[in-house]
Amino acid sequence: MWLPSGWAAARSTRCCWSARSARQAERRMGPCHRRPRPSASTAVRRTACAGDRGPMIAGYDTLDLLLGLAAGLACGFLNTAASSGSVVSLPIMIFLGLDAASANATNRLPVLVGAAAGALDFAGRKAMPWRLAFRIALPTTAGSLIGAGIAELVPRRDMGLVVTAAVLVAMLLLFKNIKKAIEQAQDQPIRLGARELALFFGTGIWLGFIVLGGATCMLLILTLAVGFDLPRANAVRAAALVPVTLVSMGVFVASGDIN
C-alpha cells in the first residue's frame, strides 16, 4: 500500500523501536520467557514495516537491475554514436538513489571501463598512435586533476543543478549534427602546438569536473583542430581517457564519494 513519505518514515521508525524494545525485554526476563504468538493484525503491521519491495534477484531489486541494464545498453549505443553515454548513466544513478555528487563520482567507473576496452581494442589491431596519445594525455590528465578538485569544492546541494545543466548541454550537442561533422573529418597534417594543448587542458578540467560531453569535445578537438580522421581520433581519445579517468577517480575515492 502506498503511503506518504512522512508517514512511511514514521511507521518504519516505530516498528524498529518496537522490535528493539522487545529484544531488550526478552534479555531482562531470561531465556525461559516466551513471547506470545503474534496476532493477525501484528503480522500485517510487520509486513507493512518491512516495506513494499518487488521481487529480488541476487539481493537486488528487479526494477533496479532492469534500469541498470537499460542504462548500460543506452550508454553503449550513445558512446558508439557520439561518445555521450553519461547523458544516460548519470541521471539513472541519481534516479536509483545516489545524490548528485556521488553519482558524478561513481559515473567514472563505466567511463573507465569503456575507455580501457576501446584502447585495448585499438592496440590489438595495431591502430594506436601511442606517442601522440601520450602527448595529448598529459595536459588532459593535468586538467582532470584540477577539475576533480573543483567538483569537491562545489556544495553537494548545488551539484544537482550543475548535473542538470550539464545534461541539457550534452543533449543539445547530440542534436547539433556533431556526429556528422566528426565523421566528415579527413586526415590532415597534425597540428599539436600550444593552442591545441591548451584546448586539451581545458577539456581535461571539464572531464575531471563532470565528464558529461567531455569525450565529444575531445573528438571535436582531435578531428577539427589537430587534424585526425575519425578512427585515429577515437583511438587517441580512448587512450587519453584512461589516465584522465583514473586521476579523477583517485580524488573521489580519497573523499569517499564513489559508491
Image: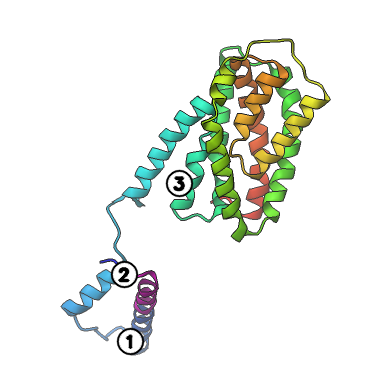
Q: How is the image coloured?
A: rainbow
Say left or right for 171 vs 14: right
The local secondary structure at tag 2 comes to loop
Horizontal and vertical percent position of residue 161: 58, 53
Instruction: State how far apart marks 1 and 2 are (Cα).
Output: 38 Å
N-terminal of the pair, mark 1 or mark 3, is 1
Q: Is residue 223 left or right of residue 59?
A: right
Q: Which residue is mark 3?
A: 92
Instruction: State whether residue 196 is above or below residue 151.
Output: above
Residue at x-position 43% and y-position 36%: 72
What is the quadrant of residue 256 in the picture? Answer: bottom right
Magenta residues?
Answer: 3-16
Q: Give amino acid for label 2.
A: Leu
Residue at 74% in and 44% down: 146
Report the disc number at residue 30. 1
Mark with earlier residue (2, 3):
2
Residue 28: x %, y % from top left = 37, 88
Amino acid type, residue under disc 3 in the picture: Ile
> Residue 13 lies in magenta, yes or no?
yes
The residue labelled by disc 2 is 3
Rendered-image quadrant of the N terminus: bottom left
Give the mark nearer the N terminus: 1 vs 2: 2
- Residue sitting at the far bottom: 29
Vertical placement of residue 51 versus 131, above or below: below
Q: Main secondary structure of the magenta part?
A: helix
Tell me if residue 217 comes above or below residue 23 in the rendering: above
Callout 2 crowding tier (Cα within 10 Å): few <14, some 14–19, many ≥20? few
**Residue type pointed to by label 1:** Gly
